């Protein structure tokens, strides 16, 4: 489908209007009933490993770290990489026993996440869909970032050759990469429906039922949009080998 075929009078495309109609809900409207469990089980069914995360407690964090720099945005356990699972029964137990918990998904095992500023992500998503390119699951986080879920490029047959995520291994380093961040092995992102401080949330724009694309099919559009909104074309992000 070409972009021109989706135009409406006034220059707005159907895709633009669809994207506006798909804006994430406020955190107060986030799934509070069985839909929360349903959404997380759908992630597990799609093969994306998940694990419990902390949740906001006002503007603080449910963890016991004084002055936590990323309240509600980090795993509960230091063993989150080995804890992450797609087992339905385990996910159900977590959801039922930890009703306020957010959840993260560990990247670099099955999938990666290309994480971009929201304005750049929305523009790139419209362009990709208009060009008929297969786009996988997409989420918006906190009103300022957009997550593009892709197949991973971080699990080669030779385990000695895998590349760690040098762009965003830890949330504390997020300010160092204001443009595109490539979450691969050793990283994670929050899953919808997560709640963030300040009545913000993480919500799906396109759900996990969409197949994971190769990240290279999205990378050019994402980096172009990031460069446009950053005002230059430098700093193209790429996972670095360990």
Image (tube, helix red, strand yellow):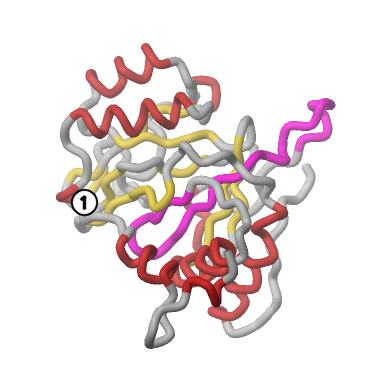
Q: What range of the chain is rendered magenta?
A: 138-162
Direction from residue 215 to residue 189 in the image, left or right: left
User: Where does the image place residue 169, in percent across and percent down from the top left?
Assistant: 58, 46
Direction from residue 190 to residue 107 in the image, left or right: right
Residue 83 visible in this rendered orientation of the protein: yes
Q: Quadrant of the C terminus?
A: top right
Instruction: Please tell me how many numbered marks the rendered image carries.
Output: 1
x 30%, y 63%: residue: 21
The front one of 5 and 98 is 5
Direction from residue 203 to residue 172 in the image, left or right: right
Residue carrying label 1 = 27
Residue 68 higher or lower than 3, as above or below: above
Is residue 174 rendered magenta in the image?
no
Tell me the crowding category of disc 1: few under 14, some 14 to 19, or many 20 or more residues within 10 angstroms, Cα based. Answer: many
The front one of 48 and 124 is 124
User: Where does the image place residue 217, in percent across and percent down from the top left?
Assistant: 69, 55
User: Where does the image place residue 127, in percent across and percent down from the top left?
Assistant: 56, 69
Quadrant of the rendered structure where residue 190 is?
Answer: top left
């Amino acid at each position: 489908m070409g972009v021109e075929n989706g135009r409406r009078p006034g220059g707005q495309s159907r895709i633009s209007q669809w994207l506006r109609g798909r804006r994430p809900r406020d955190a107060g409207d986030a799934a509070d009933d069985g839909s929360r469990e349903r959404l997380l089980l759908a992630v597990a069914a799609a093969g994306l490993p998940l694990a419990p995360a902390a949740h906001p407690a006002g503007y603080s964090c449910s963890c016991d770290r004084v002055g936590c720099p990323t309240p509600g945005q980090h795993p509960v356990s230091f063993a989150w990489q080995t804890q992450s699972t797609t087992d339905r029964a385990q996910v159900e137990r977590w959801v039922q026993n930890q009703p306020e918990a957010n959840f993260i998904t560990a990247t670099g095992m099955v999938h990666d996440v290309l994480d971009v500023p929201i304005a750049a992500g929305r523009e790139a998503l419209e362009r990709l869909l208009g060009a008929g390119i297969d786009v996988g699951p997409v989420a918006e986080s906190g009103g300022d970032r957009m997550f593009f879920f892709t197949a991973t490029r971080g699990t080669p047959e030779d385990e000695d050759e895998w590349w760690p995520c040098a762009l965003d291994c830890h949330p504390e380093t997020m300010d160092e990469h204001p443009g595109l961040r490539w979450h691969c092995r050793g990283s994670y992102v929050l899953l919808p429906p997560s709640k963030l401080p300040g009545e913000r949330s993480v919500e799906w724009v396109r759900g996990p039922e969409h197949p994971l694309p190769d990240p290279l099919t999205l990378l050019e559009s994402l980096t172009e949009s990031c460069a446009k909104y950053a005002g230059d074309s430098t700093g193209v992000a790429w996972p670095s080998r360990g």
